Amino acid sequence: MQQDPDRLPDTKPPSQWPWVIALAVLALLARVAAVVILADRHTAYYEYMLIARNLLSGLGYSFDDDGGMPMQPTSFQPPLYVYWCAAFMRLSPHNYLPLYLAQAAVGASGVFPAYLAGNGFFGRPAGLGFAAAYAVFPEMIVLTARPVPEWLYVVVFLWLLVLYLSFKFKLPAAGIPFGLAAVFGIVAGLGMLVKATVLLQAVAVFLALLLLMRRRLAVLVRQTWPVALTMLVILAPWVVRNWRVQHRWIPLRTGIGQSLWIGNNAVSEGSLWTADGRKVRFALLAESDFHSHMPDDEQDRDDYYLRHALSFIEHHPWEYARLCVNRLAYFLWFDPNHPLARNSVYRVSYVLLLAVAAAGILLSVRRRRLDSVLPLTYLLYLLFYVPVLSAPRYRVIPVLLLLLVASCAAVAFFEWWRTERAPARRALKT
């Protein structure tokens, strides 16, 4: 029987977008449940909400650091998440449920760039697997129930991965279009106004593209200068504000000296917490000698912390080395002093992720599918945090990278399992 040429069988693989949409709905439901169960809907806490409360009270972009310092104009945190909090705190000043529900919705939308990123790095099934992992992994869910910007940080990061893949596919042939480069710069610039360490991802993308271009630096700079230009345009109003209000050159935020000091002093174990479970800042701030010489100005105070941290490192190099080893262990494993790290759900989910991700790394290396941007990003985050300070939510981007490579292993296991079962299914049919 001759086949009608107008009715040839459709060999195009079925669309996975209905599954992606279903996963986005699942992600939203999981995050809403976390908000209802876990979110503190009546308390303004963490510096982002406290700065937002000052804004709404007519005190400007100011902050009292709870360490006995006077309230003053601040750049301790970048502004976008602070203004996000302020908008919802104005909308609902006595119940912050709308704030957390909005976070749940935006956080759930990360399923879409997760699918595109997984698809671009490891293929369509892995894209679906990565989207599913992002939708249900406990750490990604709980982030939306806290007034911290990491829930948005991961979404921005995922879109930057998608844009990087667009760069990668266009660069060898036609080059990166100006508009695409500008979009990357806008997303990265806005991301840095949410979380300053987005800059690490921009650097990782540049290094990965440099390897792809076989180290032709001049050619790559000509292709990517719109990225730098748009990032500078996005950051310029914040830099100008800091100069006008604080009379300092502050491109992103203050607090670097304080972070270095928290991780490196006489009572530190390398993280936010001391060995006996106290917060490092309050354990040492109680000492009158240390506190009495503290400057009032925020930037001067940060310089004060920095000098003390560098002095400690200079006079105790072996202790600093021990603290760095501790932080490396905390970054790869668990900080035993942090309350979150003692949670069984956090521990079990992370251990399972490590096991599957290790298999995914080995598999992707064997198949030559491990894009250089992934290990470069992980390495940059490790190099940034290990010398300074470690805490569980600081490694949220490395966790996201582990979820991505774990999806590669999960797909390989599923394909093996289906292949092994195929002879048994055929035998049953006959």
Image (cartoon, rainbow, N blue to C red):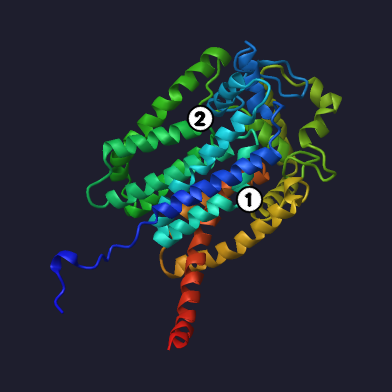
Res. 138 mark: 1
Residue appearing at x 48%, y 63% in the figure: 408
N-terminal label among 1 and 2:
1
Q: Residue furthest front?
A: 1
User: From the viewer's perspective, is residue 314 above or below residue 239?
Assistant: below
Percent of width and height locating residue 159: 43, 43
Residue appearing at x 64%, y 43% in the figure: 33
Identify the residue position indicated by label 2 in the image. 193
Mark 2: which amino acid?
Leu
Q: Is residue 191 left or right of residue 124?
A: right
Percent of width and height locating residue 31: 60, 43
Q: CA distance from mark 1 to mark 2?
A: 26 Å
The picture quadrant where one finds residue 288 is top right
Percent of width and height locating residue 297: 67, 17
| Disc 1 secondary structure class | helix
Quadrant in which the C terminus appears? bottom left
Mark 1: which amino acid?
Pro
Determine crowd level at label 1: few under 14, some 14-19, many 20+ residues with C-alpha closer than 10 A: some
Q: Is residue 12 visible?
A: yes
Q: Nearer the viewer, residue 393 or 136?
A: 136
Residue appearing at x 82%, y 34% in the figure: 283
